[in-house]
Image (cartoon, helix red, strand yellow):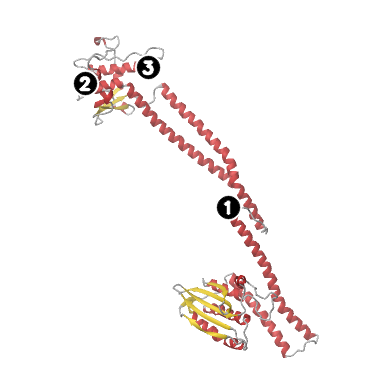
């Protein structure tokens, strides 16, 4: 099931969405806990405003913290205020919230905060005279205090980690300057950092549960949406798969429509080009077989006809007949040799021994070798000119290359002693390459047919006249040799009225 692209794509989408949802869930939980803890701290600080004001006032009056003892009257006043705060927040909704009252100031106790001085006096515990205070021991144990340097002065070290610590500053004794001034210490509330309030904890649980429901819903929706999405992405791949099977079965006559400009669209174009190339190669192969059959059949038919004529006594068995047979055999041998050379070049079996070669010297050897044929046909040869730089090449294969070019010139250029043809060979050198220009005179070749000169068995004559004796493989072999030397070869119109073969090699 999971071997298909669609299944893998669906799994990748689900895994990615699951990771994203989990990351959002964890981030939300952390952010919620942080913000909720801050909310609890702010709420607690607001509810402890009377305690903080009284604490700061007393610290200013007694900065050495000697009064932070359970039996100290000033500390008992603060505990009493803290207890009234707890009673107020613990009272049921139906009952009226008791007013927070503070004990009256004492000489050894607390002074009223600045904002309570004047006409306002520190309230005492409702219904309790100073001489009859309630037992505040349990509430006293919930309060802790650290100095500004972090030294624990009041409270048990075991409870300090779970406490909620509120910074006390010199301006906290008045609402207008709260939160400003010098740091005096830290007031700690036992278990204050934990969400002990019933409704606060319930709210946090509801938020976590609701987000869990949302996460599950998102995952389900992503799965539902991923199904058509994966089908949409995989559909063109399935079409390409079917067309690839058609190519494997030899069906090349089709063209796909590229609807998209993405990678799938580019793949569709590549499949179309592959189909066109395979179709062209199939036609070329069929044409190649037909051309080879024709090339082989022609000399064989001539030899057979002459032999049958000799056997029947129609053709005399003399030197002329034997010379004719020899000429056809030589032509057949050249064709077979050319086919063999071309097949070796195609499969890379032609051996090359690279060494430093001077092209000017090599071309002079080619001209000297074919001087007799050039003179016989009346060619006017322009003296060889050019630079004497070297290239890395195989002298034997390069000699074969220029021999084929010379044979092409001798066979297809109109030249007689009465009307001489022209041949001009020159070597041109640049900073990185050496170019050989091989130019001959009329007849020329149409510009649209010039690239086809290097195709196998291609000849300009429409009736495939064999009077010139060419097989149409010479220039194809030339291209293979030049490519093996990492060079370039091309045909262009010649200024002499014929064809220019341009061969370019990299300098040594």
**Numbered circle sitting on residue 67:** 2
State which mark lies toward you, 1 or 2.
1
Circle 1 or circle 3, nearest the eye: 1
Which secondary structure lies at badge 1?
helix
Q: Is residue 341 left or right of residue 324?
A: left
Image point (49%, 29%), residue name: 210
Q: Which residue is denoted by mark 1 in the rendering?
A: 265
CA distance separating discs 1 and 3:
71 Å
Query: Which quadrant holds the C terminus?
Result: bottom left
Q: Position of residue 412 (x, y in %)?
A: 63, 80
Q: Residue at x 44, y 24 (%)?
A: 202
Mark 3 lies on residue: 90
Q: Residue 162, image x and y in percent?
A: 34, 27
**Residue 153: in sight, yes or no?**
no
Q: Residue furthest right?
A: 312
SS state under label 2: loop
Q: In the rendered view, would you say 41 is above or below 118?
A: below
């Amino acid at each position: 099931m999971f071997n298909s692209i669609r299944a893998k794509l669906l799994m990748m989408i689900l895994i990615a969405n699951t990771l994203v949802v989990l990351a959002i869930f964890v981030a939300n939980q952390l952010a919620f806990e942080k913000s909720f803890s801050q909310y609890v701290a702010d709420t607690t600080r607001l509810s402890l405003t009377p305690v903080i004001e009284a604490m700061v006032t007393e610290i200013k009056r007694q900065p050495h913290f000697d009064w932070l003892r359970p039996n100290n009257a000033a500390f008992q006043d603060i505990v009493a205020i803290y207890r009234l705060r707890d009673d107020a927040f613990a009272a049921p909704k139906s009952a009226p919230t008791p007013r927070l009252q503070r004990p009256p100031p004492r000489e050894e106790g607390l002074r009223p905060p600045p904002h309570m001085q004047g006409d306002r006096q520190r309230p005492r515990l409702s219904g309790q005279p100073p001489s009859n205070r309630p037992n505040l021991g349990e509430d006293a144990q919930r309060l802790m205090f650290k100095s500004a340097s972090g030294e624990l002065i009041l409270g048990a070290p075991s409870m300090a980690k779970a406490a909620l610590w509120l910074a006390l500053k010199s301006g906290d004794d008045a609402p207008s300057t709260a939160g400003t001034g010098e740091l005096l210490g830290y007031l700690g509330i036992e278990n204050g950092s934990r969400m002990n309030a019933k409704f606060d904890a319930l709210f946090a649980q509801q938020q976590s549960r609701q987000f869990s429901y949302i996460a599950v819903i998102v995952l389900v929706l992503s799965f539902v949406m991923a199904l058509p999405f994966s089908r949409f992405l995989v559909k063109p791949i399935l079409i390409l798969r079917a067309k690839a099977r058609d190519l494997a079965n030899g069906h090349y006559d089709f063209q796909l429509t590229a609807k998209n400009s993405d990678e799938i669209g580019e793949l569709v174009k590549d499949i179309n080009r592959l189909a066109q190339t395979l179709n062209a190669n199939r036609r070329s192969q069929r044409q190649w077989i037909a051309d080879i059959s024709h090339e082989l059949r022609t000399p064989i038919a001539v030899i057979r006809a002459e032999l049958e004529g000799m056997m029947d006594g129609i053709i005399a068995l003399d030197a002329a007949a034997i010379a004719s047979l020899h000429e056809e055999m030589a032509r057949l041998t050249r064709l077979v040799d050319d086919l063999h050379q071309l097949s070796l070049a195609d499969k890379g079996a032609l051996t090359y021994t690279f060494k430093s070669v001077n092209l000017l010297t090599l071309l002079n050897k080619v001209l000297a070798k074919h001087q007799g044929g050039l003179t016989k046909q009346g060619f006017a040869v322009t003296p060889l000119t050019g630079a004497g730089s070297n290239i890395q090449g195989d002298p034997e294969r390069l000699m074969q290359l220029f021999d084929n070019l010379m044979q092409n010139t001798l066979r297809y250029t109109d030249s007689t002693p009465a009307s001489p043809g022209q041949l001009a060979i020159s070597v041109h050198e640049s900073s990185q390459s050496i170019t050989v220009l091989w130019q001959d005179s009329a007849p020329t070749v149409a510009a649209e047919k010039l690239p086809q000169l290097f195709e196998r068995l291609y000849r300009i004559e429409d009736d495939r006249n064999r009077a010139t004796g060419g097989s149409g493989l010479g220039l194809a072999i030339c291209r293979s040799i030049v490519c093996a030397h990492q060079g370039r070869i091309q045909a262009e119109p010649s200024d002499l009225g014929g064809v220019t073969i341009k061969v370019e090699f990299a300098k040594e």
